[in-house]
Amino acid sequence: MKWDNFFIRKGFLPKIAISPSVNLGLCVVIPCYNEPNLLKSLESVACCKLPPCDVEVIVVVNHPEGSHNLVVEASIKSVKEVVEAEKLWGSQHLHFHAVEAFNIPFRYAGVGYARQVGMDEAAYRLLNVSKPMGIIANFDADSRCAPNYLIELYRLWEQYPHSDACSVRFEHPLSGDEFTAEVYEGIAAYELHLRYYNQASRFVGFPFAYHTVGSSMACSAEAYVKYGGMNRHQAGEDFYFLQKIIPHGRFRELNSTCVYPSPRPSDRVPFGTGKAMSKLVYAHESITTYHLDSFLNLEPLFREVETLYGMDNIETTKFIRSLAIPLKQFLFNVDALKAIENVRTNVSSAKSFKKRFYLWFDAFMFLKYMNFAAENYYGKQPVFEQAQKLLDLTDENQCGNVATTMELLLRYRAMDCKEWSIKL
């Protein structure tokens, strides 16, 4: 098949001995490390309404070399739970497979490696039955999903068959008896931070403002191979993966279903949800976010991007000097003048300039600027305060201010549900 080179370069060997069904159209990939409640997540997927295509759940049970005996035992238990899931819920149209990735070299071990193993396997199986538009969905071993999760993924690609990838709506649980009140309050603040960052990015006109949450993303098998597959980052693997795809304009949001990630504290990754919750619960560090002004500083730049095409270097320098001090200093630090000139000399229209500009000032550069502004000018700020300020600037605050983080989060969830895009 025409994708053979991708697998040959990787030295890929299939891990699942059973051949895929010719009707296979959707694979759910779940990395699983030292997971006590895997069966609950598998049950959540098993309870979904099945789409017209066949579905496979591929669980990559993994641990690094030198793991404690308890971790090894947990891996063995997880493999058995996948076998049990196949007995309980497997059918002609739904199958559960365990892939054992034991004793991974320590320098590679992590969620990125596990996702890569599972997504490589899923892509190989889908392409092997001539399903380039087959779906590779990512899930987590401690997540749950709405009953229409599988069918809505299928419908998205049925309606938009040329989509490369999508983010799936997510909502952390905000109440229950599984965690303490502190955890539920903390996860509300952390999710508010994620949604505030997303909405503030959209407010100032950044075209690549989408959520990149590993447990709630999906791509086509063809796009997975086309953009080089998953990386091995120990954290942020989802962000790095999707940012290879988003700038090309075939990325969508799926808001008609929902994934429910766990709010539990975790030290498995160096940053992200679990790490933030660990800092909150064990080190009593509050959830903070970026100052709203650091976002607002970007609006004049993004508004005038096409105008930059017609400027010479002197005019461009003058324009940069007119921007807010944090952004101006950052742009000089990253040699923006040279980058803009390079973009200008390689395009023939303002429209092409704009597209190429955002390949330079992409989501990585955006985040780099935000961190620069926080470290050198604004510091990190209470998330409720900044999120309320942004809400006050939008048309979403007609009902007045709210009193709690959870109430504010519900407003932001509603905002995130609205269809959004910026055409380049």
Image (spheres, helix red, strand yellow):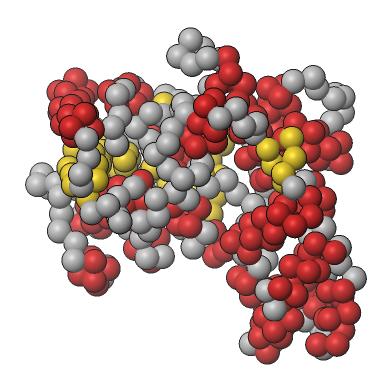
Percent coordinates x, y for residue 337 in the rendering: 74, 81
Asked whether residue 113 appears in the rendered view, the answer is yes
In terms of depth relative to the viewer, which is nearer, 139 or 50?
139
Relative to 341, residue 286 above or below: above
Residue at the image position 15 percent from the left and 50 percent from the top: 15
Relative to 273, residue 80 above or below: above
In terms of depth relative to the viewer, which is nearer, 264 or 358?
264
In terms of depth relative to the viewer, which is nearer, 9 or 337?
337
Percent coordinates x, y for residue 278 in the rendering: 50, 31
Is 423 left, or right, of 126 in this rendering? Answer: right
Q: Quadrant of residue 392?
A: top right
Can you name the residue that lies furthest to the left here?
17
Residue at the image position 47 percent from the left and 50 percent from the top: 236
Can you name the residue that lies furthest to the top here?
177
Image quarter where the C terminus lies is bottom right
Can you name the residue that lies furthest to the front here?
283
Asked whether residue 174 appears in the rendered view, the answer is no
Is 372 left, or right, of 14 in this rendering? Answer: right
Percent coordinates x, y for residue 353 in the rendering: 70, 78
Q: Quadrant of residue 18?
A: top left
Relative to 206, residue 10 above or below: below
Residue at the image position 19 percent from the left and 61 percent from the top: 12
Residue at the image position 53 percent from the left and 54 percent from the top: 251
Relative to 218, residue 87 above or below: above
Image quarter where the N terminus lies is bottom left
